[in-house]
Image (cartoon, rainbow, N blue to C red):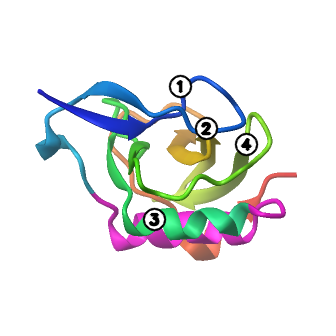
Amino acid sequence: MEIREEHTSTDAGADAPAPRRALAMETSEYRPLTPSERDLIVWMLEHGPDGATNFIPQLDDLIARSSCSCGCPSIEFSVPLESPYIPQPLGFRICCSGNSDGYDVGLMLTAGSGVLSQLDVYTFGEIDHPFNLPSLRTLDMAR
């Protein structure tokens, strides 16, 4: 384990980032976004609420790791302390749906304390095996 300072969605205060020292998982668990992950997140930000595209510059420095052991492609993010703080409403999230390997899935991108925090990918039914991110052509904004 290493100790590093980072922004996380659980930092105190909604108006400003609250740097803190946090125990991070082994750095080998974190990795850069894949091109598919980045493209999907950019699509969601471009189709999200006003100001959502302000988060796109964070993607250059953001690292990710799997946030679930069920086989879904959900990921959580770690954003370097020097990344720009993006003011956004409390509870910022973007939701959409898509199709992955023939299964309908939902996606929810969340941010807190001015940084992106997680991409949650979930099914609308039982899938007993790992599945992939949906292709961009199948995405539809949740209404």
**Over which residues does the magenta segment extend?**
32-51
98 or 30: which is nearer to us? 30
Earlier in the chain: of badge 1 and badge 4, it is 1
Under circle 1, the secondary element is: loop
**Residue type at numbered disc 3:** Leu
Earlier in the chain: of badge 2 and badge 3, it is 3
The location of residue 104, given as percent across then percent down, is 61, 50
Instruction: Write down the quadrant of residue 38 in the picture.
Output: bottom left
Report the side of 17 relative to 52 (left or right): left
Residue at 63 percent of width and 59 percent of height = 98
Gap between marks 2 and 1, in whole Å? 7 Å
| Residue 113: numbered disc | 2
Other residues around mark 3 within 10 Å, as few (<14) / some (14–19) / many (≥20): some
Other residues around mark 1 within 10 Å, as few (<14) / some (14–19) / many (≥20): few
Under circle 4, the secondary element is: loop
Say if 80 sits above or below 138 in the image.
above
Residue at 40 percent of width and 47 percent of height = 81
Q: Which residue is mark 1?
A: 10
Gap between marks 3 and 1, in whole Å? 19 Å
Q: Main secondary structure of the magenta part?
A: helix
Earlier in the chain: of badge 2 and badge 1, it is 1
Earlier in the chain: of badge 4 and badge 2, it is 4
Report the side of 47 relative to 8 (left or right): right
Q: Which residue is mark 3?
A: 59
Other residues around mark 4 within 10 Å, as few (<14) / some (14–19) / many (≥20): some
Q: Which residue is mark 4?
A: 92
**Residue type at numbered disc 2:** Ser
Earlier in the chain: of badge 4 and badge 3, it is 3
**Residue type at numbered disc 4:** Phe
Gap between marks 4 and 2, in whole Å? 10 Å
**Residue type at numbered disc 1:** Thr
Under circle 3, the secondary element is: helix
